[in-house]
Amino acid sequence: MSDAREMTWESFTKEAVTGTMPELMARLDRHRSLSFADSCLRGVGMVGFLSNPLTGLIMLAAMCYFSPWLGATVSVGVAVSTATALLLGLDQTDIRIGLYGYNGALAGAGITVLLAPEWDLGVLGYVVGAAAATTFVMAALMCFMTRTWGVRPLALPMNAVLMVLVVGLQQAKNGRLGPYIHPVNPSPGAKVDPTLRELPLGPGHDSVVQLVQAILHGISQLFFLDSTPAGIVFLVALALCSRFTAALALLGSASAVIASKLIGLDGFLVYLGIAGVNGALVCIAIGGFFLTPSLRSVILGTLAAAGSSVVFGACNAAVRVFGLPSSLSLSYCLIVPIIVVLKEMTPRIRGTELAATKGTVPERRVTVKQHY
């Protein structure tokens, strides 16, 4: 009996650090409530493209520690969006790997920044509505984007729902808009301060420490946190399932932050990590998910992450007119589909079939022939 338990524990440990734990998923499928909880945790992990419940659990625990309100809204968001997918009878495999949960989790996280106050039932009601809406948008976009372009909707459902929500609530008496929401007129000639700083109008200075913090904030902004310790914890959570994915996230955030500094984007937004998170997601998506993992895909992902800083600046200028403080992850959602579609036009870019990415990590899809 003890030997059997030991073997089970060894199997569990091996699954946890080498992939997406399919054996655990199969065992939990016997219990509906545990299966649902597992799907929700995988949904949290899928924000970083990893369907691993331990990755999701570590991230969620970190959120609860650094911001209990954030942990609560993310938990509600991922549960509502996953439950909505089940009620709609959507593809069970997609639901189980967390594909319909991560946009709900992101919607819950985003609302903590865009709406106020904390621990308010009205705000929580908006979380429920927004999370459910992301599932409808996700299902609709998958019919078009996945079948036509071979790329998933990424975080487009979250971006679309939150932007519509913020613009709509500006016309409502009980919108509960946060302090960062206020429409501004575009000022092309306005002077931009590229110095890294913690406050929009506060003093700042460029240093190696500030630069490293900005890169780590790009990781923590996966869930709308600007915290160096949270960035480290999130990076560890990604590395638990896939060291390759964690490396891509760090490389992408660094590329975007450095490129943003070189072109002189607003240092406050760069230090906050919003530019870095777009670069991190672009690098993960291109370097190891939608394209066949190789040296070539990593180089392309790094260059795309650097280029995302320009798109980020353009998207920011567009959405600020409508009152949003930033364009969220819109630049990532625009860049990745364009590069993925290119695989149909050139033999230089090798794409990965989406069916092969379900429940796998990049390391499992690499073969000797695929190296550059």
Image: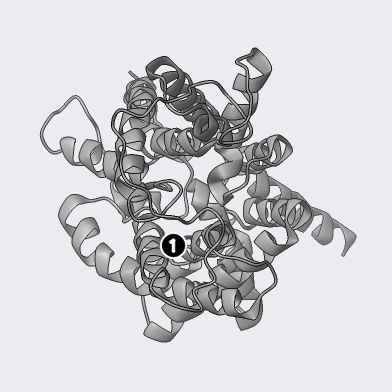
Q: Nearer the viewer, residue 260 or 253?
A: 260
Residue 43 appears in the picture as rendered: yes
Q: Does residue 343 sit above or below 12 in this rendering?
A: above
- Quarter holding the N terminus is bottom right
Q: Is residue 240 left or right of residue 254?
A: right
State the SS at label 1: loop
Q: Residue furthest left?
A: 345
Q: Residue at x 76, y 49 (%)?
A: 10
Residue occupying image coordinates x 43% and y 38%: 278
Q: Is residue 315 left or right of residue 49?
A: left
Residue 292 in sight from this viewpoint: no
Q: Residues within 10 Å of mark 1 (few under 14, many from 20)?
A: many
Q: Could you say where residue 87 lies in the image, as x and y percent from the top left?
A: 43, 86
Q: Give the residue number, with chain letter if any, for mark 1.
A: 99
Residue 280 x %, y %: 47, 35
Colour scheme in use: one colour
Q: Quadrant of residue 208?
A: top right
Q: Amino acid at mark 1?
A: Leu
* Residue 93 falls left or right of residue 213: left
Rendering coords of residue 26 (x, y %): 58, 68
Residue farthest to the right, as pictured: 2
The quadrant where residue 232 appears: top right
At horizontal 32% and vertical 41% (from top left) the residue drawn is 317
The x and y percentages for residue 340 are: 24, 40
Name the quadrant containing residue 33.
bottom right
